[in-house]
Amino acid sequence: MIALNPKQTVRVDIDDAWFDVRPLTRGEYLQLGQMSTGDEHSMIENAVYTVACGLVGWGGLVDESGHEIPFSFDAIERIPHKAFVDLFIKIQSLSSTQKSDVPS
């Protein structure tokens, strides 16, 4: 699972918001592998790392009062759980390919 084109971005629409995501770079993917221990805490950290690396912007994300939440990495924790999971899956999907297909 290594990105062939880390500059490729894809817009993901979830509810009334949109999120721009990209595949992980080779270095990010290798770091992810080093972080993995297989326990539940490690899996959560891996998901947060994946979304933090692969998320490049959003719009239309609002708080409980209806105020738009500007994009920032500090605000990632404000993404609703279901949207966060969907983003994690999308970034993983974009990053998936055969290791042998990636030039050294």
Image (tube, rainbow, N blue to C red):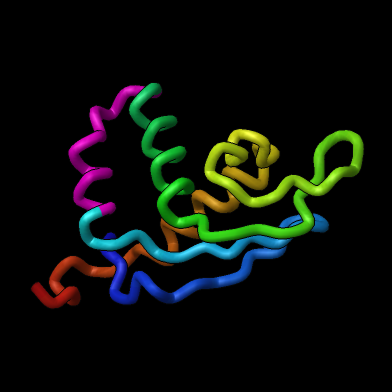
The magenta segment is: 28-40
Specify the quadrant of the image occupied by residue 4.
bottom left
> Most extreme residue toward the left, as rendered?
104
Q: Residue at x 86, y 44 (%)?
A: 67
Q: Which of 83 and 61 lies nearest the eye of the viewer?
A: 61
Image location of residue 33, percent across then percent down = 22, 43
Q: Residue at x 71, y 64 (%)?
A: 13
In the depicted view, which residue is nearer to us: 37 or 80?
80
Whether the magenta-drawn stretch holds residue 38 is answered as yes
Residue appearing at x 70%, y 49% in the figure? 70
For the image, the number of numbered tags is 0
**Residue 36: percent from left, percent from top:** 25, 34
In the image, taking residue 79 as reference, residue 50 lies left or right, namely left
In what quadrant of the picture does the N terminus appear? bottom left
Q: Is residue 56 above or below residue 61?
A: below
Magenta-drawn stretch, dominant element (helix, strand or loop): helix
Find residue 96 and report its image quarter.
Answer: bottom left
Looking at the picture, how far across and down is residue 69, in whole percent? 74, 45
For the point 52% across and 60% down, which residue is it? 56
34 lies above or below 53 = above
**Which part of the image, by quadrant, shows the C terminus?**
bottom left
Vertical order, 100 against 32 (above or below)? below
Q: Position of residue 95 (x, y in %)?
A: 36, 63
Which residue occupies the foreground of this view, 37 or 64? 64
Picture quadrant of residue 102: bottom left
Residue with the most extreme right position:
65
Residue 104 covered by magenta stretch: no
Relative to residue 98, is residue 38 depicted above or below?
A: above
Q: Is residue 12 left or right of residue 38?
A: right
